[in-house]
Image: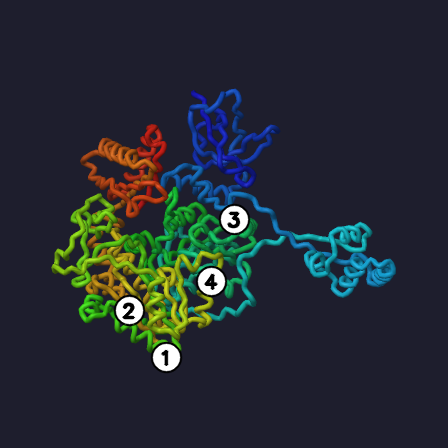
Amino acid sequence: MRQQYADIIVDITQEKLDRTFQYKVPQKLVGKLEEGTVVEVPFGNGSRIIKGYVISLSEEPKIDPGRLKEIHGISIKEVGAQENIIALAAWIRKQYGGTMIQAIKTVIPVKQKQRSKEKRTICLSISKEEAEEKLGIFQKKHQTARARLLEALMEEEELPYELVTGKLNVTSQVIKALEEQQIIQCSSVTVYRNPIHVEGKKEYTIRLNEEQEAIVRDILLHWDDENDRTSLIHGITGSGKTEIYMELIAHAIAMGGQAIVLIPEIALTYQTVMRFYRRFGERISIMHSRLSPGERYDQFERAKKGEIDVMIGPRSALFTPFPNLKMIIIDEEHEDTYQSETVPRYHARETAIRRAQMENAKVVLGSATPSLEAYYRAQNGEYRLYTLKRRAKESRLPDVEIVDLREELRSGNRSVLSVALREKIEDRLEKKQQVMLFLNRRGYAGFLCCRSCGHVIKCPHCDVSLAIHNNGKLVCHYCGYEQEQPKLCPTCGSPFLSGFRVGTQQIEEVVQREFPKARILRMDLDTTREKDGHARILSSFADHEADILIGTQMIVKGHDFPNVTLMGVIAADLSLHAGTYRAAEKTFQLLTQAAGRAGRGEQKGEVIIQTYDPEHYSIVNAARQDYESFYDQEMMYRMMAGYPPCAHLMEIHASCADKDQLDMGMNYLKQYLQQIIPKKAMVSVIGPADEQIAKINDMYRKVMYIKYKEQQMLLKIKERVEQYIGANEGYRTILIQFDMN
């Protein structure tokens, strides 16, 4: 039997993560090791035994075999949170591609140990009588610093070290001298950096209504059913999904477990944390990219030691190393931000379900507008489906009016604000109520739209809108089809053909000009770059320090402002024709979520949706808040076109600094795919074509799509492609990434 070798990453908490070490596999372990196995290995000059993780196995030594050490054995200690997460990394690598090191870096976001923060205090070691005696001696000898410290300690039993050296102006040498004389005693305790800053805990008083209680009861009834691990709560905006989450988490905590709550982005952290803090107090924490390395490290340490019960945060919070994870909540599960944009391009929903299977935990998905994938699985019995049909606080859904921008143009109004929206903003300002204006720019790539009839020019092969390029061409980013940009609308002959080019800053200028006395806040990437940018803007608006909040999609997700009675959607079409098969779904979700922000208090809400395509089913159904009708119509389109969830779609993204090399590499890859895929298999290979943004940071970018009804076939193709790329030198300078569905 040939000698086997294993590439191993040593214990991440002790060593840098950027390289592996090769070890010999002893005969007794051959066949027992796989990617992610936790082993014990001799390391360093003293060959101390430390923990490591198997990254890959081979029969080829990288250096002289005589210099390689042998694996000591498989770690027989009880499997803990870290080991489970490494096993999850191995699953992510197989499912989404990339290397094992990339997968491990993904699941262990805190790479380096940070210095602990210590709280140091000083107290008296002698009685007050002895202290008075010493004070007299210090005063006689004019030792003023010692006298000052002693006087302060006689008033207060304990003083912070920083206060003594700062405000009392006593040097560390003086402190050390008094400590050596055993007059005072210095002590220090490790304190965790806490990113949650809350003043005073308010009482939690919310009671569940009948609908909410029924869902909680049923989930708890099926809690131990291994075949029933995932539930989907489809509840209209404002129906009280968060209260259900908290009730279920309270049950998990009562069992001695912990819970992870995923939210789509940092903008939601502020309000979510406040609600959870009122229920669970200081046993919650947050994890997101804006925290300092020290704060991130401390939160993971607290989680490992079981000092917190609930971790709240975007995608990366999924990998919190809880020792007894019982529940994973994914709020607004339909959001794109749950899909990683870097290798490995994992999806938080699928990864959460996998982690829950490994750790015997429960997954609850929630959304007013579930992704078609989640709802499709719920309809097919893979997930347990629950529905909330009324708002928790008995407030009514807002009235929605669709404004046809073609009519506005015909009547001579060329402003970004329709007449109806302008009048309603004026009315709300007079009533001292608040307004939100949403610019729907998600996925915007610049499509060509006729402002007279609303016609959008689409690809004849893929049924997605063609994107405008600077060279005057219209291009499909699925199959590469392109055509010249027409001067007149092919449907009505109008010369008013244009892309809608407007940003939040321009909207702000228009609104400020129209309503000079209005106090306006803008929330987009530019205004939220600072660490607490989201929280600062949202708390200002919540405290009614502004009348109008203008923003991109970050303002329409999950926020609850009772005084907002008007939501204006500036241009619904920007996402409706974004050049992707998901465009209608994303538009419906955004418009429904936007409409849900209005009228959450005592006053009835109103929504104005401005569009050039008022009859489109995604806009009509969003205005009605009718998810089922939208789902039925969209699924018919997906079924006919063979798009997910009716089939599976794998994307191969490639980028390279050399355009010719990239073109050649992708063409060879397509030829290879045509060789290995049997013609009778009915697998569709589309592309290669330029990405929506064909060049970023001097890197050219292309994409290829592979469609098939079964995901397992696509995973096999992915493995073959990875082997082909690894065996060919020409791909060394081309970065290849895989994306599922």
Q: Nearer the N terminus, badge 4 or badge 3?
A: 3
| Quarter that holds the N terminus | top left
Q: Tell me if residue 518 can be seen.
A: yes
Disc 2 to disc 3, C-alpha distance = 53 Å
Please tell me in which quadrant of the rendered image residue 697 appears. Answer: top left
Percent position of residue 116, x then y: 61, 49
Please tell me in which quadrant of the rendered image residue 35 appears. Answer: top left
Of the residues shown, which amino acid type is indicated by label 4? Ala
**Residue where numbered disc 4 is placed:** 535
Disc 1 to disc 2, C-alpha distance = 18 Å
* Mark carried by residue 116: none
Q: Secondary structure at mark 3?
A: loop
Disc 4 to disc 3, C-alpha distance = 31 Å
**Residue where numbered disc 2 is placed:** 417
Establish if 604 lies above or below 466.
below
Residue placed most toward the observer, 667 or 360: 667
Disc 4 to disc 1, C-alpha distance = 27 Å
Q: Nearer the N terminus, badge 4 or badge 1?
A: 1
* Mark carried by residue 323: 3
Q: Do tag 2 and tag 3 residues touch (Cβ < 8 Å)?
A: no
Q: Do tag 1 and tag 2 residues touch (Cβ < 8 Å)?
A: no
Of the residues shown, which amino acid type is indicated by label 1? Glu
Q: Which of labels 4 and 2 is toward the front?
A: 2
Percent position of residue 419, x then y: 26, 73
Q: Tell me if residue 624 can be seen.
A: no
**Residue where numbered disc 1 is placed:** 430
